[in-house]
Image (cartoon, rainbow, N blue to C red):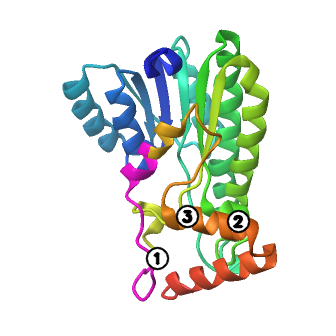
Amino acid sequence: MKTFKENYGPWCLVTGASSGIGQQYVKLIAAQGLNIVIIARREDKLLALKKELISKYNIKIKIIVADLTSISGLEKVKKETDGLEIGLLINNAGREDSNHFLKINTKAHLETIALNIKAPLLLTHHFGAKMVGRKKGGIINMSSIVAFQGVPYIVNYAGTKAYNLIFSEGIASEFKKHNIDVLAVTPGFTKTKLARAYDFTETPFTPLDPSFVAQKAVRDLGRKRLSIPGFINAFLYWNGKLLFSRIMNTASFGMVFRKVLRKTL
C-alpha cells in the first residue's frame, strides 16, 4: 500500500494554520513527512510554528500571510504556491458570528460567507484542477455538526457549514474517478477561538480538544467522506437523522445555543 506521503505529498496546504484545529493539522501532517504551506493572518504565530516544525521534522515550511476573505488574499496564495505540487488541501480557516441574526451587521455576515464558502470554493477549484491532472490528491473541508439543520443564533454560520458539507459530498463523487479523496469534517464544540463566546457551565457539554478532531480527520481521509469526531456529536447526528424532524432538530439546537450564549444574547 502507498504511504500517506505518496498519496498526498509532497506538499500540503493548510488555511487557518496558526492556531486551533488548523495548527493541529499542520503538526500531524508534518509528522508524516510532507512539506507544508501554512496560511493565516498572524505572521508571528506562523513563524513560531515554522521554527518548531523545521527543527523537529526537517521539512520545508512556506509561510503565506493572507486575508482569505479578499480576492487579493486568495490570488496571493495562488501566486506564491505556483510551482509547488500541492497534494493535500485542508480548507480549515473559518469564522463565526454568534447572536440574533438582525443584531449582526451585514458586513460581518458577508465576511463569514467569504471566508467559509468563497475561499474553500476557489482554492478547491484551483488546486483540485491540478490534482485531477496528476490523478491523485486529497481535500479536507471543515464543516460542523450544525450543518445538518438550521440553528438559531448562528444562522449564517450554520448555513455556511451546510454548504461546506454538501459541496464536499458532491466534489467527492466527481473526484473519485481521479483518485482524489475528499472529506468533510463535522466537529461540535471545540476548544478554539470560535468558542470564546460560549459558556459551558450548567451544560453537559465538554468541548473537544483540537488535536482529537484533527487526528480523526487524518485517519478518516481516504476511508470515509464524512468524519464526525466524538461520541456526543455522533449521537446528535444519528438522533437527528433517525428520530427528530428537521423542526425538532432546529428547536433543540436553538435551546443549546441559547444556553451557551446566554451572556451574549
The range drawn in magenta is 199-215
Q: Position of residue 202 (x, y in %)?
A: 42, 89
Task: Indicate which label's residue lies in the foreground, 1 or 3.
Answer: 3
Left or right, residue 152 beside residue 82: right
Mark 1 near mark 3, Cβ–Cβ under 8 Å? no
Looking at the picture, does residue 56 appear above or below residue 90? Answer: above
Work out how far the residue at label 1 is from the one at label 3, CA to CA, in angstroms. Answer: 17 Å
Mark 3 near mark 2, Cβ–Cβ under 8 Å? no
Looking at the image, can residue 114 be seen? yes
Q: SS for tag 1?
A: loop
Residue type at mark 1 is Tyr
Left or right, residue 65 beside residue 246: left
Q: SS for tag 3?
A: helix
Residue type at mark 2 is Asn
The structure residue drawn at horizontal position 74% and vertical position 73%, both measured from the top left corner, is 243
Instruction: Give neighbour class at mark 1: few <14, some 14-19, many 20+ (Cα, 10 Å).
Output: some
Q: Is residue 207 magenta?
A: yes
Please name whichever residue, 129 or 253, is drawn nearer the observer in this view of the structure: 253
- Residue receiving disc 1: 198
The structure residue drawn at horizontal position 57% and vertical position 36%, both measured from the top left corner, is 73
Instruction: Give neighbour class at mark 2: few <14, some 14-19, many 20+ (Cα, 10 Å).
Output: many
Answer with mark 2 or mark 1, whichever residue precedes in sequence: 2
- Residue receiving disc 2: 156
